[in-house]
Image (tube, helix red, strand yellow):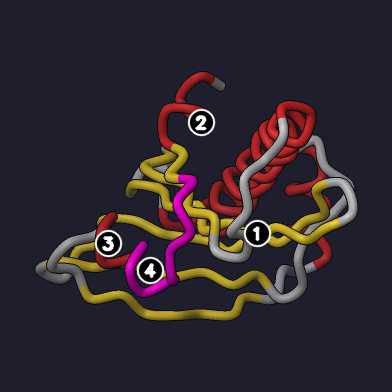
Amino acid sequence: MAAVAAAAAWAQSTREEALTAVYPGATVRAEQVFLTPSQRKQVLIRGDTDVIPTPVARYVATKDGKVIGRAYVDTHAVGTRQESLLISLDATGQVLRIDDLATNRARPIAGAALAARETTIAVRRIQAIDAVLELPAR
């Protein structure tokens, strides 16, 4: 997941700033999606995860009437604190950028390693959710 590390934008951002930066000139629509039991099962398998957010918070970016990407909020524990990431994908589901929405502290070396692992897990989870939600469209 070297692309995950390269895509990370660890400076704290607001959602609006992050969405504007990753999808310039696009119209972004917020959605809350509730996965069906079948979709949840597919995400658990595809994402190799045991945690799925309910509801799924996502943003769909369109430009000239075409979907150019989707972004998802993933909140998870990193050690003893919560971290919220905005994981932005292109139209094919590849990671464009990762923004840290909820933390604003320097990470010690051990904390950085833990955060990197949790970020990788979050990206897998979000890509699995996106793939399942986009199945009918592909």
20 and 125: which is toward the camera: 20
Marks 3/1: CA–CA distance: 21 Å
Q: Which residue is mark 3?
A: 67
Q: Earlier in the sequence, mark 4 or mark 1?
A: 4
Q: Which residue is mark 2?
A: 4
Q: Is residue 24 above or below residue 89?
A: below
Image quarter hosting the N terminus:
top right
Does the residue at mark 4 contact the one at mark 3 (Cβ under 8 Å)? yes
Magenta span includes 35: no
Marks 4/3: CA–CA distance: 7 Å
Q: State the extent of the magenta-drawn residues as a range.
A: 10-18
Name the residue located 40 percent from the left edge and 45 percent from the top edge.
97
Q: Is residue 132 visible?
A: yes
The three-letter code of the residue at mark 2 reads Val
Q: Earlier in the sequence, mark 3 or mark 1?
A: 3
Callout 1 crowding tier (Cα within 10 Å): few <14, some 14–19, many ≥20: many
Q: Earlier in the sequence, mark 2 or mark 3?
A: 2
Q: Nearer the viewer, mark 2 or mark 3?
A: 2
Q: In the drawing, what numbered circle is on residue 46?
A: none
